[in-house]
Amino acid sequence: MNRHQLLSQSVQMAFVIGGVLAIYISLTTFWLFPHREWLTVHNLLVVISLALTAFVGYQFRVAQRSISEMLLGVGLFFSVIMLLYIGSYAATTAWFADGMAWIPFFYHDYNRHGFTSVSDYLNHRNNYRELLELQIFSFVIGSVMYIVAGSVGYVGRVLLDALKEGR
């Protein structure tokens, strides 16, 4: 595969898993169910996205592309996922807060302070802005995880190649 095909494949995979994450994060705010179950499904989706990131790194090595090109592919992959993920969260909380039953990420904070509606919670002081800033901060932390996952896939293929040559 050439560089364009690899980057295109990365973006396509990112739209699929990013879309699933965005739909999950948006739609699950309208129905209450056990937080632990919500978190388990969310974490499973994140682990799947990290595994796909490792696959992206692996594919770049299989195609004999440089590590800088792999990092570009992983960066595109991650950026698309986060754009969909944070964008859906921002849109849902900005325009549909009155219909929301809860905000899963902030479930404990929401309950501890005794809020009875998501809209009241978001409008209290600067909660909406602070929660959005927290999501953006998560973007920074997530970028490190995705770069590591992509690198693991790339280096894993390097090791496999070295083992094949050593036989």
Image (spheres, helix red, strand yellow):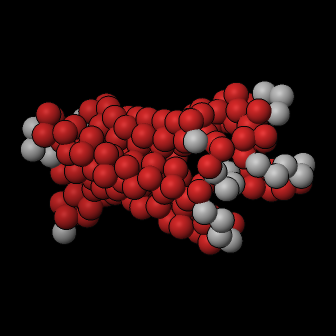
- The tally of labels here is 0
Q: Quadrant of the C terminus?
A: bottom left
What residue do we see at 40% from left, 55% from top? 20
Residue with the most extreme right position? 113
Is residue 77 found left or right of 1 in the rendered image? right
What residue do we see at 22% from left, 37% from top? 7
Residue 3 rendering spot, x and y as whole percentages:
15, 35
Is residue 129 found left or right of 167 in the rendered image? right
Residue 8 rendering spot, x and y as whole percentages:
19, 39
Residue 90 rendering spot, x and y as whole percentages:
56, 35
Q: Quadrant of residue 75?
A: top left
Q: Quadrant of residue 30?
A: bottom right
Residue 96 rendering spot, x and y as whole percentages:
58, 42
Q: Nearer the viewer, residue 163 or 85?
A: 85
Q: Nearer the viewer, residue 157 or 20?
A: 20
Q: Nearer the viewer, residue 98 or 29?
A: 98
Looking at the image, residue 94 lies above or below residue 12: above
Q: Quadrant of the N terminus?
A: top left
Residue with the most extreme front position? 98
Q: Quadrant of residue 83?
A: top left
Is residue 143 found left or right of 162 in the rendered image? right
What residue do we see at 20% from left, 45% from top? 9
Taking the image as drawn, is residue 51 in sight?
yes
Is residue 105 found left or right of 7 in the rendered image? right
Taking the image as drawn, is residue 86 in sight?
no
